[in-house]
Structure formats: structure tokens, C-alpha cells
């Protein structure tokens, strides 16, 4: 399983460093900002705090799911490797509602210094956090802040655009099959960025999307992937967590693009690429700030320029020319000299959704998208 955002509000684009700001009575206050942590290389192990920090992680699936939760578990391991004087624990397979709230209560009552929820849990954490003001709570994807509650997110679209360049460069690929979980804004935004990248190379390429309404359902993912292959897909991509889509691609002898973590081992013969989430430096920055007494709530939204998003190793079928283009575009995005969301952009219903000379601004990214771009076959389900 991965995560499900129940509401979408603008996240303030900050440097990758802290979590969220203000309670209900101070909600109009601007989030605190601090310098972004370096993410290009692992830092030297930080000095241990006087008293060990106790940090708990909460996952909505298993830590070896090959996708979302494993990427966050990699972040926890990064934190352990790069900061002395901490103790961490984790709990898996939690669901929103009573289970999340019980876990927040449990860790708070035990005196944990920080609790990290790696999925959508804003509603539940805001119920519990006021009862434990000495515990810092971090949650993925939220927007409503409190004095001891922070939120963080990653720019899927940055990585998906680069994956699209890889997909569009593959010879003979006319139709890409894309298995998505839920048609929430983040996923749709990623599909659109993927299509922009693919059509930058091959203007005639199309992407057919199938939604399985789950983040982890091997049977449904296998069925969707096979249906796409049967419909003529020459390449498969996924934004779900089970290895089923990779297995279908491997069996069909077509290329495969993964999501959020290095999945090259899932389909060694079909593997092309897959962007990665690098949560470790963010977790380290939060823990160090807490140890230093400098932690402040803030909203965090990081992408390629912050090191939150990276790329897996490329497969053998990806040419040196394509790799060079991907690196060029990556650097241009980091430098701010290239904007893949620059208009004009037309949706798959023929409507101009981003005008000539306009763009989807960074601080507005999390509101996008409630439309699918031209070239995508499929629709966003009602409701």
C-alpha cells in the first residue's frame, strides 16, 4: 500500500529542511524556512545529542514492498547510518483512522521525541498531537499545521518527466501502458509530466492509463498490466507497489519503468529506468534540528533541486544519448533554466489548460492536476 490524500491544498515550496507551522489559532502565520540540507552526498555522521533521540516511523504497508514504504524505510536506514545517539522503531500495515490515532497516542505516551507518518495522516495526527506537545509529528502530504506537527512531500512530476524522456526514446514504442493506483492529483500530475517527457522525443506516442484503485493489489495490478499488453502496449510503467506490472513486462519482453525506488531487480531484462525518492536527508535534517533545539514547524515540498527526487540506474536498452539528455534536463531543472510545464498545454479533451507564456508554478503544483494531458488515453473517474 502507499498513500491516499483526501484533500489537496497548496503546499508552500520550501527548502528541504523542516516540517509544518501554526495551529488553528495561528494558521495564517507563514511557515518557517531554513536552509536546505545537502543531499548530493551522505554527510559525515552527525554528533550525538546529549540524550538519545527516540524516533518512530509509521508505514501503511510493509517496509519491503518494493515501492513507497521501502523508499521511506531506506530513509530511516539513512538516518540511522548518519546520526549517532538515536533510537528508532517502526510499525507496519497501519490504516487511517483508529489505527493511526492509536499509534500516535502510543508513541506520544511513551515519550518519543519524533514520530514520522509516511502516508496521508493529517486528520489523525491533528487529533492526537495537542495531547503530546513534547513530541514532534511529521506527516506526508499534509497542509494544516500545528506547533508540533510538520508535513513533507516530494515532487513526483520531476522524476516522471525524466522517466518520460526514457520511454519516448525507446525505438518502436507507440503505446505506453500505465498502471496507476488512485487518480489523485499527485498521480495525475506525474502521468502528465511523464507524457510531456515522452512526447518531447516522440510527438506521436500515446499513453493508456488504467486505475486499479489501490496502492498494493498484486492481482489487480497484474490484470491491468496484462490488459494493457493485450491492447498493444509496447512498454509498461507503474505507480503502484506490487511487483506484478514488472513481472508482466518481463514476461511480455517489453520495457518497464518503475516508481519511487530502484526496481531494476524486479525485471532485469525489461528494466529501463525509474525515479527515486530520497527521504533520508530530510529525516536527518529534522532529527538534527530537534537535537539542536532549532526545530520549527514548516511545510516542505522537494524535488530534483532539493535532492528529494533522483534517478535509478538505467537499463541496458537506454542509450548513452538518452542518458545524456536526461542528465542535461535534470541539471536544467535544478538550475531553473528549463520548465517542462511551460505552456501551451492542452488536455486530452482539447482544452488549453496552460496558456502560451504561462506555467504551473512551483507553489501551485500540488493543486494540479484534475485533467489528463493530450496523448493520454483514459479519464479521471468521477468522485
Image (cartoon, helix red, strand yellow):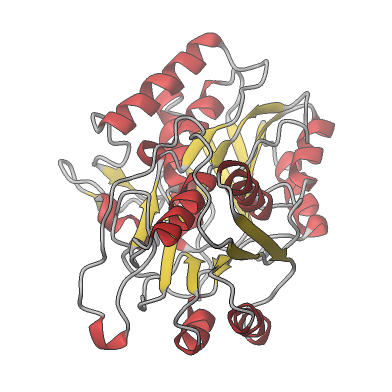
Choose between 201 and 149: the one closer to the eye. Answer: 149
- State how many labels appear: 0
Residue at the outermost top position = 320
Q: Nearer the viewer, residue 85 or 58?
A: 85
Q: Is residue 16 left or right of residue 204?
A: left
Q: Is residue 288 above or below residue 126?
A: above
Q: Quadrant of the N terminus?
A: bottom right
Q: Residue 324 appears at what percent x and percent y?
A: 45, 14
Image height of 131 relative to 293, above or below:
below
Instruction: Please report the residue visible at 48 percent of the width from the left and 83 percent of the height from the top.
Output: 129
The quadrant holding residue 258 is top right
Query: In which quarter of the view is residue 117 placed?
Result: bottom right
Residue in the foreground of this view, choosing between 110 and 36: 110
The picture places residue 34, in percent across and down from the top left corner, at 28, 53
Residue at 60%, 17% in the rendered image: 318
User: Which of the 4 image quadrants contains residue 185?
Assistant: bottom left
Residue 277 seen by the camera: yes
Look at the image and tell me whether residue 1 can be seen: no
> Which residue is most to the front?
50
Q: Position of residue 92 (x, y in %)?
A: 74, 66
Percent x, y for residue 310?
A: 50, 35
Amino acid at each position: 500500500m502507499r498513500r491516499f490524500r483526501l484533500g489537496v491544498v497548496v503546499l508552500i515550496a520550501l527548502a528541504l529542511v523542516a516540517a509544518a507551522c501554526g495551529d488553528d489559532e495561528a494558521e495564517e502565520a507563514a511557515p518557517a524556512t531554513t536552509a536546505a540540507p545537502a543531499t548530493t552526498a551522505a554527510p559525515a555522521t552527525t554528533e550525538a545529542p546529549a540524550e538519545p533521540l527516540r524516533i518512530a516511523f509509521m508505514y501503511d504497508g510493509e517496509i519491503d514492498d518494493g515501492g513507497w514504504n521501502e523508499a521511506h524505510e531506506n530513509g530511516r536506514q539513512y538516518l540511522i547510518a548518519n546520526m549517532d545517539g538515536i533510537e528508532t522503531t517502526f510499525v507496519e500495515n497501519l490504516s487511517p483512522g483508529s489505527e493511526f490515532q492509536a499509534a500516535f497516542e502510543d508513541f506520544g505516551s511513551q515519550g518519543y521525541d519524533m514520530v514520522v507518518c509516511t502516508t496521508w495522516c493529517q486528520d489523525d495526527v491533528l487529533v492526537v498531537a495537542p495531547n503530546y506537545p513534547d513530541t514532534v509529528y511529521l506527516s506526508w502530504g499534509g497542509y494544516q499545521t500545528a506547533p508540533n506537527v510538520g508535513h513533507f512531500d516530494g515532487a513526483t512530476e520531476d522524476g516522471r518527466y525524466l522517466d518520460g524522456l526514457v520511454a519516448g526514446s525507446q525505438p518502436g514504442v507507440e503505446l505506453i501502458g500505465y498502471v496507476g493506483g488512485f487518480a489523485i492529483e499527485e498521480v495525475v500530475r506525474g502521468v502528465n509530466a511523464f507524457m510531456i517527457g515522452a512526447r518531447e522525443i516522440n510527438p506521436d506516442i500515446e499513453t493508456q492509463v488504467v486505475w486499479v484503485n489501490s496502492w498494493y493489489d498484486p492481482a489487480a495490478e497484474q490484470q491491468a498490466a496484462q490488459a494493457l499488453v493485450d491492447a498493444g502496449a509496447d512498454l509498461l510503467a507503474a505507480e503502484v507497489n506490487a511487483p506484478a506490472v514488472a513481472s508482466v513486462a518481463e514476461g511480455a519482453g517489453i520495457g518497464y519503468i518503475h516508481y519511487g525506488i530502484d526496481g531494476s531487480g524486479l525485471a532485469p531484462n525489461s528494466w529501463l529506468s525509474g525515479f527515486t525518492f530520497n527521504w533520508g536527508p530530510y529525516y536527518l535534517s529534522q532529527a538534527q534540528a530537534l537535537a539542536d533545539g532549532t526545530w520549527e514547524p514548516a511545510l516542505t515540498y522537494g524535488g530534483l533541486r532539493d535532492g528529494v527526487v533522483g534517478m535509478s540506474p538505467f537499463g541496458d536498452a537506454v542509450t548513452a544519448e538518452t542518458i545524456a539528455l536526461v542528465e542535461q534536463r535534470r541539471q536544467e531543472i535544478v538550475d531553473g533554466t528549463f520548465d517542462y510545464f511551460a505552456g501551451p498545454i492542452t488536455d486530452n479533451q482539447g482544452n488549453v489548460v496552460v496558456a502560451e507564456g504561462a506555467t504551473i508554478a512551483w507553489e501551485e503544483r500540488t493543486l494540479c492536476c484534475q485533467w489528463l494531458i493530450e496523448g493520454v488515453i483514459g479519464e479521471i473517474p468521477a468522485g
